[in-house]
Amino acid sequence: MSRMRYSSCRLVVILLVAAIVETPHAQTGKKVYLSVDMEGISGISGDDQLSPSGREYDRSRKLMADDANAAIRGALAAGATAVVVNDAHGSHRNIRPEDLHPAAHLITHGFKRYGMMEGLDDTFDAVIFIGYHAKAENPAGLFPHTGTGVVRDLQINGRSVGEGGMNAMLAAWYGVPVVLVTGDDVAVAQVREVATSAKGVAVKRAINVRAVDLEPLDQARRSIEAAAREAVASAKRSTPVRATPVNVQMQFKTTLIPEIVEAFPNIKRVAPDTVAYSSESMPAAYRLIRVLYRFINPD
Ligand SMILES: [Zn+2]
């Protein structure tokens, strides 16, 4: 090898080493994950707004993007350099990309392993829940349910949780803090029982499971933006919570799904309407929860 070739090789090696050493520091901004549901979005109050067959549905798609965009503006103002939005309602095809902040990636379509938390991993610094609602059978809170309409109660490690609770537990597995939750006042309080360090913005007050007192839209979005800015600025990754096994118990509103899924290895039918299982990780437990409430259809 000539001397010149040797020194140019050495230069390449030095540059490569420098690039590898620099990579962790190159991205100083935070990576933020948004899971966006629909029932708890600003301005949404009726079930004709919640699915494509509803007369008011098209309005909701824009309202959903508007609340997400407020949180994205706040996150970016706090120095976020990557934002991923996961559409997490119904078909998971509600948010139109043309309505969404141009800085955000959009995960869309409901055929997902991890549903409301698809795409989350341990590279993120903060999770934000937008438009969340109270859990199944809650006597208050707008449109309370867990997953779909088939679940009466979901317990993870002996604790009854709704969607916010189970999603917060999955985030905790990856060491990613839930820093903000928005929705009606009942939903926000309920999610914060699990995600205890999260800020909350109630964009409406639930009078009961159907009637609400809506915050003015501009005010709601200003509150979301300000809370997201503060929450992302102070977000700190935490030690992953990885106690195993993860014990899941699901009570259904009828006996039909338990009748089918007791055939699954490791799923026990502990009551006519209730099944239980243990998983070796929270992602595995979560994935099966989703299969049980969404993809088993006895009708
Ligand atoms: Zn939901």
Image: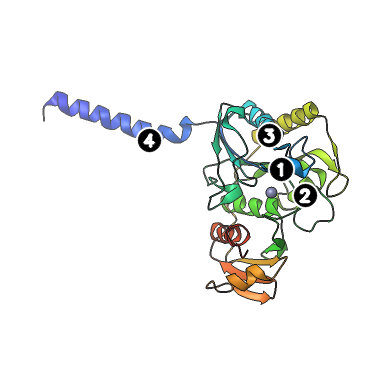
Label 4 neighbour load within 10 Å: few <14, some 14-19, many 20+: few
Numbered badge on residue 20: 4
Kindly report which numbered mark, 2 or 3, lies closer to the viewer in this rendering.
Answer: 3
Q: CA distance from mark 3 to mark 1?
A: 9 Å
Q: Quadrant of residue 137?
A: bottom right
Q: Position of residue 107 (x, y in %)?
A: 54, 40
Q: Position of residue 37 (x, y in %)?
A: 67, 43
At label 2, the amino acid type is: Phe
When the figure is inspected, residue 92 is found, relative to residue 78, above or below; the finding is: below
At label 4, the amino acid type is: Ile
Residue behind mark 2: 143
Q: CA distance from mark 4 to mark 1?
A: 47 Å
Residue behind mark 3: 58
Label 2 neighbour load within 10 Å: few <14, some 14-19, many 20+: many
Residue behind mark 1: 50
Q: Quadrant of residue 103?
A: top right
